[in-house]
Amino acid sequence: MNTSNLSAGQIFKNYKEITTALSEPIKSGNAKKAQLKEWERYFKHDKEGNKFIITHIYNVPLPENHNRTKYISTIEKLIIDKIMKSDQVGRVFISKAALLKELKMINQNYTFAKYKQLRLSKHMNITLEEIEDFYLTSDSLLKRNIEAALTSLRNQSLIFWTNAITLCIVNSTAQINGYNQIKTSKHETINEYGEEEVDFTVSNPTVYREYRKADKEEVKLILKLERETLNKYGCDSISDIFKKGLSKRFYKDVRDQLFEVSNIFFYFNSYEIIANEEHLLEKWDELTHFQMEEEEANEQKCILNEDIINRINENINKRHERSSEKYLLGGGDKKTLMRTDKKYIVNSNILTETLIYKGAESIKESLENM
């Protein structure tokens, strides 16, 4: 197919005219339908009557039979590209949020606003319940997508991956004296009875945060505290915690207990990926557009971002439809009622634009200044 004659914004008055530009034969019936479907791999267009309006041309054709779930193969390619270009070839240790952001599956606002949802609610004039629902559903989708791609690569024996835990540990240092001892400061005061009282403090203490992978004993401690907290809330799984809307209370409770018995401030999920370097390199060589042109890889990320947005918005509409049907039949709960409102679709789409769309403006300053 010859797309060299196409440009974004170009308008062809009918099917015959665009086939001429593409050097494609004129077809009819099912053959024409298949041809139009094949064109979608090379460019995007809108239809106005008989007119074809070109909106985007792909430098790299999309995989065959590309649909809303086929973007998993794009994620695979981008993960391979990430591994082969990493400083430590053969191993990648990265948080889920960092990987999602690097692949442009979320933008810079997503993770920051996730921990400031009440501020986000006030800033965007969207209910906290809708924001919590958005994060719950999008987190689940994004996690499934990433892990589906990782599992596919594992099935090809190109990588081995595991879930891991990253810790944020609070450590401290103090000034040392000439005898390599912790230097202390002396504070003398006279009390109401004229007696001298002396207090001692550590000189110039410094507190800092350190991030690293949890070791076996630390993982066991986290699991123990999580399980005990599940029992406290009468839940059998963390999924139950989310379903009951107890996630914030649950994790705060676990973190408070964890900090009480250790210097661990908080923890989060990460991925550890070990690569079969020799054969992964062969696979990478097949994807020449990634290793030769960084611009091509960036375009794939932009396409992936569009696909993720479309998938999230499709799911929003489906949830609205299912909830509306359920409510009409006299069923459902508070969440079901929320999803029946037409504002649910509008507000959820606004959240997608703000938290997922790669071109969204940063809202960090706005939230911090509230």
Image (cartoon, grey):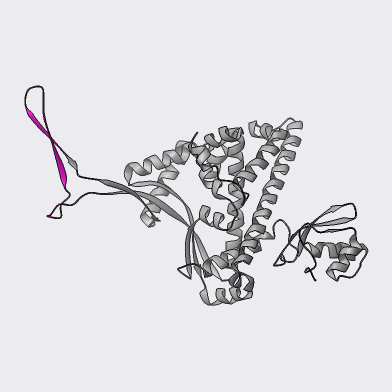
Residue at 80% from the left image edge and 71% from the top image edge: 2
- Classify residue 45 by image quadrant: bottom right
Q: In the rendered image of this protein, does residue 131 appear above or below residue 4? A: above
Above or below 325: residue 289? below
Position of 36 with respect to 356 (left or right) is right
Q: Position of residue 321 (x, y in %)?
A: 75, 39
Vertical order, 20 against 100 (above or below): below
Position of 309 compared to 182: left or right? right
Which of the 4 image quadrants contains residue 19?
bottom right
Q: Magenta stretch containing residue 282, yes or no?
A: no
Question: What's the magenta region?
Answer: 173-200
Q: Nearer the viewer, residue 6 or 88?
A: 6
Determine if residue 266 is in view. Answer: yes
Residue 113 or residue 364, whichever sits in front: 364
- Horizontal arrangement in the rendering, residue 176 relative to residue 21 (left or right): left
Q: Quadrant of the N terminus?
A: bottom right
Residue at left offset 81%, top offset 62%: 37
- Furthest-top residue in view? 192
- Residue depicted at x 68% and y 55%: 307
Q: Nearer the viewer, residue 290 or 264?
A: 290
Q: Can the viewer see residue 329 in this picture?
A: no
Residue beneath the point at 51% across and 74% down:
277
**Which residue extends farthest right?**
28
Residue 80 in the image, given as x and y percentages of width and height: 57, 67
Reply above or below: 146 against 136. Answer: below
Q: Position of residue 106 (x, y in %)?
A: 58, 51
231 vs 158, left or right, is left
